[in-house]
Image (cartoon, grey):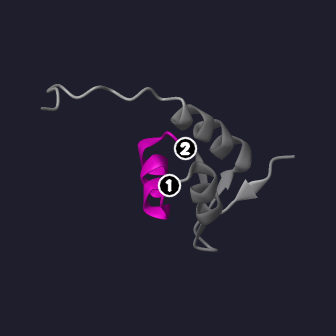
Amino acid sequence: MNEFITVSEAAKILQVSRPYVYKLIESGRLVAEKRPILRSVRIKREDAEKLAKELAYQPVQPSAKPRP
């Protein structure tokens, strides 16, 4: 069975802010179930953990200009 977590819990797993979790949801990178009657959003823990691994392994892009 899938465990659902809150936006705050997802933010802790992803090591990002709550507003950034909402941006991830809006962009489609993180799937969320919106519960309008309860005025809440729930995210599958599995999805948050998977995205956390992806974010942890993203290579840093070098800047266009070398630092002096």
Crowding near the residue tagged with mark 2, few <14, some 14–19, many ≥20 C-alpha atoms within 10 Å: some
In this view, the mark in front (2 or 1): 1
Residue 18: x and y in percent read: 49, 63
Residue identifier under label 1: 16
Q: Please give left or right for residue 30 compared with residue 63 in the image.
A: right
Question: How many angstroms separate mark 2 from mark 1 (CA)?
Answer: 13 Å
Residue labelled with disc 2: 30
Nearer to me, 6 or 36: 6
Q: Quadrant of residue 56?
A: top right
Q: Secondary structure at mark 1?
A: loop
Answer with the quarter of the image where residue 27 lies: top left
Amino acid at pointer 2: Leu
Q: What secondary structure is the stretch in magenta mostly built from?
A: helix
- Tell me if mark 1 has few (under 14), some (14-19) or many (20+) residues whose alpha carbon lies within 10 angstroms of its own: few
Quadrant including the C terminus: top left
Residue 10 is left or right of residue 25, and the answer is: right
Q: Position of residue 13 (x, y in %)?
A: 64, 52
State how many labels appear. 2
Q: Nearer the viewer, residue 22 or 64?
A: 64
Which residue is rendered at x = 50% and y = 55% of the image? 16
Q: Position of residue 48 (x, y in %)?
A: 64, 45
Vertical comparison of 21 with 51: above or below: below
5 relative to 19 in the view: left or right: right
The stretch of residues the image draws in magenta is 16-30
Residue type marked 1: Val
Give residue 59's position: percent from left, percent from top: 44, 26
Tell me, yes or no, whether the highlighted magenta stretch contains residue 64: no
Q: Image height check: is 22 above or below 66?
A: below
